[in-house]
Image (spheres, helix red, strand yellow):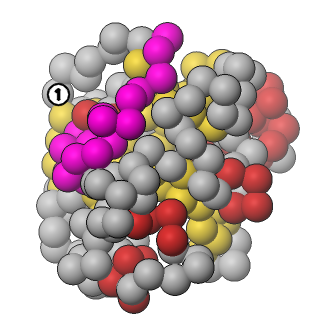
Amino acid sequence: MKALSRRFFDRDPRQVSRDLLGKILVRGRGEMMGRIVETEAYLGADDAAAHAAAGRTSRNSVLWGPPGHAYVYFIYGNYFCLNVSCLPDGVAGCVLLRALEPLAGFEEMARNRGMETSFEPRSLRLLTSGPGRLCEAMEITRERDNGADMTLRSSQLWIADDGHRPRKIVVTPRVGITKSAEAPLRYFIYGNEFVSGPKGARAGRR
Protein backbone atom coordinates (compact mmCIF):
# COMPACT_ATOMS: atom_id res chain seq x y z
CA MET A 1 0.00 0.00 0.00
CA LYS A 2 1.16 3.51 -0.69
CA ALA A 3 0.51 6.56 1.46
CA LEU A 4 -1.71 9.27 0.02
CA SER A 5 0.26 12.27 -1.20
CA ARG A 6 0.05 15.79 0.19
CA ARG A 7 -1.46 16.88 -3.14
CA PHE A 8 -4.38 14.54 -2.47
CA PHE A 9 -5.35 16.67 0.54
CA ASP A 10 -4.52 20.03 -1.05
CA ARG A 11 -8.06 20.33 -2.44
CA ASP A 12 -11.62 21.29 -1.53
CA PRO A 13 -12.72 19.21 1.52
CA ARG A 14 -15.79 18.07 -0.43
CA GLN A 15 -13.59 16.41 -3.03
CA VAL A 16 -11.29 14.95 -0.40
CA SER A 17 -14.25 13.61 1.62
CA ARG A 18 -15.55 11.70 -1.38
CA ASP A 19 -12.15 10.43 -2.48
CA LEU A 20 -11.17 9.24 1.01
CA LEU A 21 -13.94 6.65 0.94
CA GLY A 22 -12.34 3.25 0.42
CA LYS A 23 -8.90 4.37 1.61
CA ILE A 24 -7.30 2.81 4.70
CA LEU A 25 -6.48 4.43 8.03
CA VAL A 26 -3.34 2.78 9.40
CA ARG A 27 -1.89 2.76 12.91
CA GLY A 28 1.92 2.47 12.81
CA ARG A 29 3.11 -0.38 10.61
CA GLY A 30 -0.33 -1.86 10.26
CA GLU A 31 -0.99 -3.13 13.79
CA MET A 32 -4.51 -1.77 13.33
CA MET A 33 -6.17 -0.82 10.05
CA GLY A 34 -9.64 0.15 8.91
CA ARG A 35 -11.19 1.10 5.59
CA ILE A 36 -12.76 4.58 5.60
CA VAL A 37 -16.48 4.21 4.85
CA GLU A 38 -17.95 7.53 6.08
CA THR A 39 -16.67 11.11 6.11
CA GLU A 40 -17.86 14.70 6.59
CA ALA A 41 -16.48 17.86 5.01
CA TYR A 42 -15.84 21.06 6.97
CA LEU A 43 -15.18 24.03 4.75
CA GLY A 44 -13.17 26.41 6.91
CA ALA A 45 -13.67 29.87 8.34
CA ASP A 46 -16.93 30.49 6.44
CA ASP A 47 -18.50 27.22 7.63
CA ALA A 48 -20.44 27.95 10.84
CA ALA A 49 -20.13 24.30 11.95
CA ALA A 50 -16.34 24.23 11.55
CA HIS A 51 -13.87 24.89 14.37
CA ALA A 52 -12.11 27.29 11.99
CA ALA A 53 -15.15 29.62 12.14
CA ALA A 54 -13.79 30.93 15.46
CA GLY A 55 -10.57 32.01 13.76
CA ARG A 56 -7.09 30.61 14.13
CA THR A 57 -6.18 29.54 17.68
CA SER A 58 -3.57 27.34 19.31
CA ARG A 59 -6.23 24.62 19.57
CA ASN A 60 -7.21 24.55 15.89
CA SER A 61 -3.97 25.65 14.23
CA VAL A 62 -3.59 22.31 12.41
CA LEU A 63 -6.69 23.17 10.35
CA TRP A 64 -4.83 26.04 8.70
CA GLY A 65 -2.24 23.81 7.10
CA PRO A 66 -0.22 22.31 5.69
CA PRO A 67 -2.66 19.75 4.24
CA GLY A 68 -2.57 16.08 5.20
CA HIS A 69 -2.15 16.44 8.97
CA ALA A 70 -4.28 14.99 11.76
CA TYR A 71 -6.49 17.37 13.72
CA VAL A 72 -7.74 15.63 16.87
CA TYR A 73 -10.13 17.19 19.35
CA PHE A 74 -12.00 16.10 22.48
CA ILE A 75 -15.77 16.47 22.40
CA TYR A 76 -18.52 16.35 25.03
CA GLY A 77 -15.86 15.52 27.64
CA ASN A 78 -16.15 11.95 26.47
CA TYR A 79 -14.35 11.04 23.22
CA PHE A 80 -11.92 12.13 20.52
CA CYS A 81 -12.62 12.88 16.87
CA LEU A 82 -10.12 12.56 14.01
CA ASN A 83 -9.96 15.01 11.10
CA VAL A 84 -7.40 15.51 8.36
CA SER A 85 -6.47 19.00 7.17
CA CYS A 86 -7.18 20.06 3.58
CA LEU A 87 -6.54 23.01 1.25
CA PRO A 88 -3.29 24.98 0.84
CA ASP A 89 -1.14 26.01 3.79
CA GLY A 90 -2.76 29.02 5.45
CA VAL A 91 -6.33 28.14 4.39
CA ALA A 92 -8.51 26.24 6.86
CA GLY A 93 -10.47 23.12 5.93
CA CYS A 94 -10.73 19.50 6.98
CA VAL A 95 -12.49 16.16 6.68
CA LEU A 96 -13.89 14.31 9.69
CA LEU A 97 -13.53 10.52 9.60
CA ARG A 98 -16.84 9.14 10.85
CA ALA A 99 -16.57 5.36 10.41
CA LEU A 100 -14.19 2.56 9.47
CA GLU A 101 -14.58 -1.04 8.38
CA PRO A 102 -11.98 -2.94 10.47
CA LEU A 103 -9.34 -4.78 8.44
CA ALA A 104 -6.60 -5.70 10.92
CA GLY A 105 -6.03 -5.62 14.67
CA PHE A 106 -9.54 -6.71 15.65
CA GLU A 107 -8.57 -8.03 19.08
CA GLU A 108 -6.57 -4.95 19.99
CA MET A 109 -9.41 -2.71 18.83
CA ALA A 110 -11.85 -4.67 20.97
CA ARG A 111 -9.59 -4.39 24.03
CA ASN A 112 -9.27 -0.65 23.46
CA ARG A 113 -13.06 -0.40 23.32
CA GLY A 114 -13.54 -2.60 26.40
CA MET A 115 -15.45 -5.15 24.34
CA GLU A 116 -15.43 -8.92 24.13
CA THR A 117 -13.60 -10.36 21.15
CA SER A 118 -16.40 -12.62 19.94
CA PHE A 119 -16.55 -10.76 16.62
CA GLU A 120 -20.19 -11.46 15.96
CA PRO A 121 -21.47 -9.17 13.18
CA ARG A 122 -23.12 -6.73 15.57
CA SER A 123 -20.18 -6.48 17.97
CA LEU A 124 -17.72 -6.16 15.08
CA ARG A 125 -19.71 -3.22 13.70
CA LEU A 126 -19.59 -1.48 17.08
CA LEU A 127 -15.79 -1.39 17.00
CA THR A 128 -15.43 1.54 14.61
CA SER A 129 -18.90 2.75 13.59
CA GLY A 130 -18.86 6.40 14.60
CA PRO A 131 -16.11 9.02 15.09
CA GLY A 132 -15.66 8.41 18.82
CA ARG A 133 -15.63 4.64 18.49
CA LEU A 134 -13.04 4.60 15.73
CA CYS A 135 -10.73 6.87 17.73
CA GLU A 136 -11.06 4.71 20.83
CA ALA A 137 -10.50 1.52 18.82
CA MET A 138 -7.41 2.93 17.09
CA GLU A 139 -6.07 4.56 20.28
CA ILE A 140 -6.26 8.03 18.75
CA THR A 141 -5.84 10.88 21.22
CA ARG A 142 -5.04 14.56 20.90
CA GLU A 143 -1.85 14.25 22.93
CA ARG A 144 -0.57 11.35 20.85
CA ASP A 145 -1.76 12.16 17.34
CA ASN A 146 -2.70 15.81 16.87
CA GLY A 147 -0.53 17.22 14.09
CA ALA A 148 0.62 13.81 12.82
CA ASP A 149 1.63 13.85 9.15
CA MET A 150 -0.79 11.38 7.58
CA THR A 151 1.04 11.34 4.24
CA LEU A 152 4.07 9.49 5.66
CA ARG A 153 4.33 5.72 6.11
CA SER A 154 6.74 6.42 8.98
CA SER A 155 3.99 8.27 10.88
CA GLN A 156 2.14 6.57 13.73
CA LEU A 157 -1.10 7.44 11.95
CA TRP A 158 -1.39 7.58 8.14
CA ILE A 159 -3.75 6.93 5.25
CA ALA A 160 -3.08 4.37 2.55
CA ASP A 161 -4.46 3.53 -0.88
CA ASP A 162 -4.77 -0.15 -1.83
CA GLY A 163 -6.65 0.51 -5.05
CA HIS A 164 -10.14 -0.14 -3.68
CA ARG A 165 -12.88 2.02 -5.22
CA PRO A 166 -16.47 2.15 -3.85
CA ARG A 167 -19.23 1.24 -6.30
CA LYS A 168 -21.68 3.86 -5.00
CA ILE A 169 -21.30 6.90 -2.74
CA VAL A 170 -24.22 8.56 -0.96
CA VAL A 171 -24.28 12.25 0.06
CA THR A 172 -26.50 13.51 2.91
CA PRO A 173 -26.59 16.42 5.38
CA ARG A 174 -24.07 16.27 8.20
CA VAL A 175 -25.22 14.72 11.48
CA GLY A 176 -24.79 15.59 15.15
CA ILE A 177 -24.49 19.35 14.61
CA THR A 178 -26.84 22.34 14.87
CA LYS A 179 -25.08 25.00 12.77
CA SER A 180 -25.23 24.61 8.98
CA ALA A 181 -26.82 21.23 9.60
CA GLU A 182 -28.66 21.21 6.28
CA ALA A 183 -25.49 21.29 4.16
CA PRO A 184 -25.06 18.06 2.12
CA LEU A 185 -21.51 17.35 3.31
CA ARG A 186 -21.68 13.80 4.70
CA TYR A 187 -20.39 11.04 2.41
CA PHE A 188 -20.55 7.28 2.83
CA ILE A 189 -20.28 4.02 0.93
CA TYR A 190 -23.76 2.82 0.01
CA GLY A 191 -24.88 -0.29 1.87
CA ASN A 192 -21.76 -0.63 4.03
CA GLU A 193 -22.73 -2.03 7.43
CA PHE A 194 -20.04 -0.06 9.25
CA VAL A 195 -21.48 3.36 8.39
CA SER A 196 -22.78 5.04 11.55
CA GLY A 197 -26.44 5.61 12.32
CA PRO A 198 -29.63 3.54 11.85
CA LYS A 199 -29.89 1.05 9.03
CA GLY A 200 -31.98 3.39 6.87
CA ALA A 201 -29.33 6.10 7.06
CA ARG A 202 -26.62 3.57 6.17
CA ALA A 203 -28.56 2.62 3.05
CA GLY A 204 -28.96 6.24 2.05
CA ARG A 205 -32.69 6.54 2.74
CA ARG A 206 -32.84 9.96 4.43
At 41% across and 19% down in the image, what residue appears? 161
* Residue 36 rendering spot, x and y as whole percentages: 43, 34
Q: What residue type is labelled 1?
A: Lys
* Residue 133 rendering spot, x and y as whole percentages: 62, 51
Q: Is residue 17 visible?
A: no
Q: Nearer the viewer, residue 6 or 32?
A: 6
Q: Is residue 92 above or below residue 149?
A: below
Left or right of 203: which side holds 144?
right
Left or right of 109: which side holds 3?
left
Disc 1 residue crowd, few under 14, some 14–19, many 20+, Cα 10 Å: few
* Residue 15 rendering spot, x and y as whole percentages: 19, 44
The quadrant of the picture occupied by the C terminus is bottom left
Q: Is mark 1 on a helix, strand or loop?
A: loop
Q: Is residue 157 visible?
A: yes
Q: Nearer the viewer, residue 64 or 126?
A: 64
Please report the bounds of the magenta region as a residue range.
1-18
Q: In which quarter of the image is residue 112?
A: top right
Q: Mark 1 points at which residue?
A: 168
Residue 12 highlighted magenta (yes or no): yes
At 76% across and 61% down in the image, what residue appears? 143
Q: In which quarter of the image is residue 18?
A: top left
Q: In this view, does 25 lie above or below 62?
A: above
* Residue 199 rendering spot, x and y as whole percentages: 35, 45
